[in-house]
Amino acid sequence: MPHKIGFVVVSSSGHEDGFSARELMIHAPTVSGWRSPRFCQFPQEIVLQMVERCRIRKLQLLAHQYMISSKIEFYISESLPEYFAPYQAERFRRLGYVSLCDNEKTGCKARELKSVYVDAVGQFLKLIFHQNHVNKYNIYNQVALVAINIIGDPADFSDESNTASREKLIDHYLGHNSEDPALEGTYARKSDSISPLDDLAFDMYQDPEVAQIIRKLDERKREAVQKERYDYAKKLKQAIADLQKVGERLGRYEVEKRCAVEKEDYDLAKEKKQQMEQYRAEVYEQLELHSLLDAELMRRPFDLPLQPLARSGSPRHQKPMPLLPQREERGTENQFAEPFLQEKPSSYSLTISPQHSAIDQLLPATDPHPKINVAGAYSKTWSYREDALLALFKKLLEMPVGTPKEDLKNTLRASIFLIRRAIKDIVTSVFQSSLKLLKMIITQYIPKHKLSKLETAHCVERTIPVLLTRTGDSSARLRVTAANFIQEMALFKEVKSLQIIPSYLVQPLKANSSVHLAMSQMGLLARLLKDLGTGSSGFTTDNVMKFSVSALEHRVYEVRETAVRIILDMYRQHQASILEYLPPDDSNTRKNILYKTIFEGFAKIDGRPTDAEMRARRKAATEAAEKQKKEEIKALQGQLAALKEIQAEVQEKESDAVKPKNQDTQRGKAAPAEALGILDEHYLDNLCIFCGERSESFTEEGLDLHYWKHCLMLTRCDHCKQVVEISSLTEHLLVECDQKDGFGKCYRCSEAVFKEELPRHIKNKDCNPAKPEKLANRCPLCHENFSPGEEAWKAHLMGPAGCSMNLRKTHILQKAPALQPGKSSAVATSGPSGSKAGSKIPTPKGGLSKSSSRTHTKR
């Protein structure tokens, strides 16, 4: 008769934290099942290995209420999956597929139980999950499977044709006519009948302990029917019907208790626990009154198996479950104590007694003292789990020196097995006891018995992944405890030399990892880098920088901030080698605030001014120059006022009628004043203070036009349209221009160059090197060096043999004789004073740059 087939999960394409595919091996009301990673790639796949080669008759799938795959495909194989033998990928044979409902009618509140009838022989079953149905609850586009149930018969290793021939031969000797369709149909129905206790719905809604009792009672009922003890069978049938209702109610209580624990409502959890115990006791008392249970031998086991038990009717069904690979210890963890029921001939009562847990078989008796039973590690009562760990702690401490190495290693590995389980415990005291036991094993047990580094490595490698997972716990206290212990363990002298923990901390952060987990991993990395450095610690410049740069793109701000801090710490130690892992420092990169922070941090470490400091310095320099300019103007205005007073006094002494000879005398008297540098107040009228040209057309509007188009000493900025002195054009582009952020200064020629072209400009080395300012002036138009001094600028920009790139050099040279030779030098010398003392320089359309007047003042 087809029955439930046990299986283990061989592999899966991925899972969300806490929802491993191994959960599918457990059937109970509180299981969560498997869940794909967030925003995963489709299709996703899971491979199951059945306990034996069998003929599958029925598959049952319990889908999630809203993480629903649109389609699930089924494949079967006789041997290992293809990824163990890539050259034999054809070993899986496709059986077909089923489509799942999108669950919109129920509002995504109910779970669909899908039954699939098949007829296929093999030992490996592969499920392929396709794209999910879209709904408002499934925000991460995941698919999930709460449970899967396999029902079938053990398959003989001979082929199916031989099996069919053998069945026909048996039918012939029994006198059955296999050609009779009515008989054939009856036989088929009998062979294909499936017990309700093997149905997936039974385990998913029944209390595990009551479910096992029901199975044993059903087994006794069948035995009673075979022995024709029908009254006893009737009593067992009624007890089974009653217990099914009891099991469903207890299962509901267990779910409510689990929800209360997750919400940390421990008062409600305690109330539900007491309610369950009271109700269970009442039911067992009633069973005892009906002579179905022996009260004296009734003992509650520490825990019960959550996976279905094999039926004992056939020796084939009693084969042990195959253990998972070393990384999957679920197979051993689920070998809990199994209750057995035994009928007494006198009273027909049933008794329940526990067997030893599987962990007892892993802990050998290495001393003459009685072996300590640590089955309490599987108890539902947290205090029993804690006591079991403390008892194991004491046992290991008292282990005598000289114990055989093999026994010591077995004991250690079994202890690590328990520690892994206890690290996952939600109760803080149990979790802390596991850490205490782990620390003792690494720092005391292994050194005391002189075990090899392989044993220490085993302890670390088996526990560090689970510990890292706990650093992402919802409880802040557990997160801090786990992170602190990992840091402490990494510094153990026995662990430090192995360099194992750093290799785990530089693993790339998963996109779907929890916020707490990512933050804890970053924090641990930062702290251990300071403790261990990048020498022979497992941390290298390469793995730390690759991890940190990738973390800069994480969605959580705290993670990105810690990554920046790690990169700056690495730069302090390794300087230029860190730049290889970062993009170039240019304007585009600095648009990213993180990279801007990093490069400014590098500047501070190097002692260079940051961009903000440079801007502050330029602003301060501009303000200082403006202040100095105002002070100079004020002083010149005072000088002008004094000149006006002197001129007024002279005019009072002169007569109103001035003869020509008297005018000559006055001119002679004026010469000394002129020689002293005292200027007539109308001297600046009709004069360009930059090129020295004087013209009657130089009214206020005429000077604007002259500045704007014709003055050989001025030019228009192509970027901001301001009129500036050619001698200050470079400074204007770097400091004052509206487009100044787009220019950089070449250290060789000292000129302003577009930042985009600056690297190529510097690399080509085609520019003419500039000389120091004291030795030569530098023309920004023709890029040539010439004699220093202000007068040299006029000769270069206005003279016929001067700058060939000055486009304004036109008719001014022809007008040069019109200037008074005696006043030409005076203009160049006195021009600045005149510009400060006179009215403001007119600003034509586009404006006259402030640098023009300021630069001219320096002359």
Image (spheres, rainbow, N blue to C red):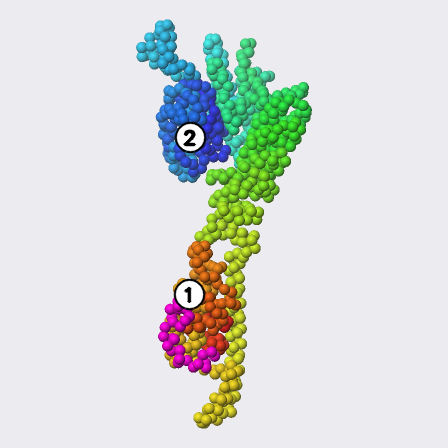
Classify 10 Å Cα crowding around label 2: few (below 14), some (14-19), many (20 and above).
Answer: some
| Badge 1 amino acid | Cys
Question: Does 826 sit above or below residue 489?
Answer: below
Magenta highlight range: 800-826
77 vs 607, nearest the viewer: 607
Residue for point 47% across, 79% down = 826
Q: Position of residue 412 (x, y in %)?
A: 61, 26
Residue depicted at 48% across the width and 72% down the height: 790
Q: Secondary structure at mark 1?
A: loop
Looking at the rendered structure, which numbered label has been put on residue 537?
none
Q: Position of residue 513 (x, y in %)?
A: 49, 38
Q: Position of residue 249 (x, y in %)?
A: 49, 26
Q: Is residue 153 above or below residue 259?
A: above
Q: How many marks?
A: 2
Mark positioned earlier in the residue sequence (2 or 1): 2
Q: Which mark is residue 782?
A: 1
The answer to whether residue 527 is magenta is no
According to the picture, the residue beneath numbered tag 2 turns out to be: 45
Residue 102 locus on image (x, y percent): 37, 33
Q: Residue at x 67, y 23 (%)?
A: 402
Q: Is residue 385 visible?
A: no
2 vs 1, front mark: 1
State whether residue 405 is above or below residue 528.
above
Q: Where 728 falls versus 377 (above or below)?
A: below
Q: Is residue 72 visible?
A: yes
Classed neighbour count for the residue bearing mark 1: other residues with Cα under 10 Å, few (<14), some (14–19), many (≥20): few
Residue 819 covered by magenta stretch: yes
Residue name at image x 38 percent, y 37 percent: 134
Q: For the N terminus, give its image quadrant.
A: top left
Q: What is the quadrant of residue 342 in the picture?
A: top right
Question: Tag 2: residue type?
Answer: Glu
Q: What is the distance, in whole Å, between disc 2 and disc 1 at their CAs?
A: 71 Å
